[in-house]
Amino acid sequence: MIIIMKPSASQADVDAVVSRVRGFGLDVHLSAGEAHTIVGVLGNTGALDRSSFEVMPGVEGAVRVSKPYKVASREFKSADTVIDVRGVKIGGENIVVMAGPCSVESRSQIIETALAVKEAGAQVLRGGAYKPRSSPYSFQGLGEEGLELLAEAREVTGMPIITEVLGPSEVPLVTQYADILQIGARNMQNYRLLQAVGKVETPVFLKRGMSSTIQDMLMSAEYVLANGNYNVILCERGIRTFEDYTRNTFDINAIPVLKQLSHLPVIGDPSHGTGKWELVAPIAKASLAAGADGLMIEVHAHPAEAWSDGAQSLKPDRFATLMAELRNLAAALGRSM
């Protein structure tokens, strides 16, 4: 069982719940975030009456969950979670497209791309200021300069920005700039980082690990949720298999499975899922047909000159064409863009 405290709950309210649980001979695990404190009840909870906790001061609700991922599960919440990011709603009926370059390279590059994707209909600007690369000799990102350029692009376009955070120590800095914190595939099971982003209110965009199962991904989401941050977005970006024609094998099955198991929004990333720009459009459409709540697509005005991931980046005109096609598909699916 998990007991969720209201944001307004006092320490005395929390202590009273803990004392009551321990009175039954059970132990507790406390997770305190900026917005919520969650009391996890450890042991055989069969004898506990959920309603007796729900009437206690400061308690928002108590839920008995059988899945190992408690707060992320449909058992915890049957309705889809909708996350509001500067007025952009992620989840629900609206389909959101996040677009932009793999990495921020210069002011002119990010501003040009931001204006182009906004004109085509993107609602969130993506761009990497910190880049985890397989080779230590590859471009690692502009760091805080890149964050400042993303913030400027937000001022110019009005679009919220999403960018990756690599380690717990960088969370305070990146949170000053970003509207959504991205956890990359290589960091999906970096539990210290997950705990750190769980203690802030900024929405978290969690990418599936390269060789991770769906349950692995949901358990990683649980780390963020259990630390008090309920604003988590899941991203299917392909997994590593024996097939080497594409960069990854995009697991289209994962989208409806995640929607069935969890209430969290699910985004498809056909750029990393394929690694080839010519495959981005068909896999983007397949993602929406499978029930994705949105897409993350890499766009670069000059892919041949990109400092990273140029092979999977769409040119702005191709992105605009794809967006027009996606609007027609969304309408056919009874959704909006």
Image (cartoon, grey):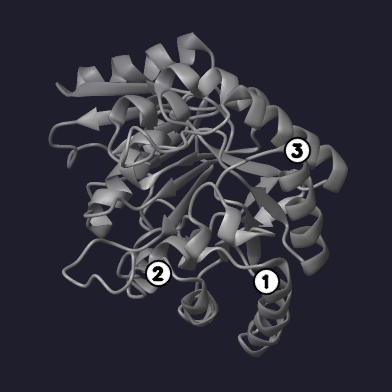
Q: x, y percentage for residue 253?
A: 32, 75
Whether tag 1 and tag 3 are in contact, CB under 8 A, the answer is no
For the residues marked 2 and 1, what is the alpha-carbon distance in whole angstroms? Answer: 16 Å
243 or 163, nearer to the observer:
243
Residue 236, percent from left and from top? 40, 61
Q: What is the C-alpha distance between the residues marked 1 and 3? A: 21 Å
User: Which amino acid is tagged 2?
Assistant: Thr
The quarter of the displayed image where residue 192 is located? top left
**Residue beneath label 3, please?**
107
Vertical side of 162 occupied by 286: above or below: below
Q: Which mark is residue 319?
A: 1
Q: Residue at x 31, y 65 (%)?
A: 248
The residue carrying pointer 1 sits among few (fewer than 14), some (14 to 19) or many (20 or more) residues within 10 Å by Cα, namely many
Which mark identifies residue 10?
A: none
Name the residue: 32% across, 50% down.
Answer: 218
- Callout 2 crowding tier (Cα within 10 Å): few <14, some 14–19, many ≥20: many
Quadrant showing the N terminus = top left
Q: Amino acid at mark 3?
A: Arg
Q: Earlier in the sequence, mark 2 or mark 1?
A: 2
Height in image: 278 above or below 153?
Answer: below
Along the polypeptide, which appears first: circle 1 or circle 3? 3
Give the x, y percent position of residue 216. 24, 50
Residue drawn at the location 73% of the way across and 54% of the way down: 113
Q: Amino acid at mark 1?
A: Phe
Nearer to us in this view, 309 or 96: 309
| Distance between the alpha carbons at the discs numbered 2 and 3 | 28 Å
Q: Which residue is mark 2?
A: 274
Between 68 and 150, the one lying in front of the other is: 150
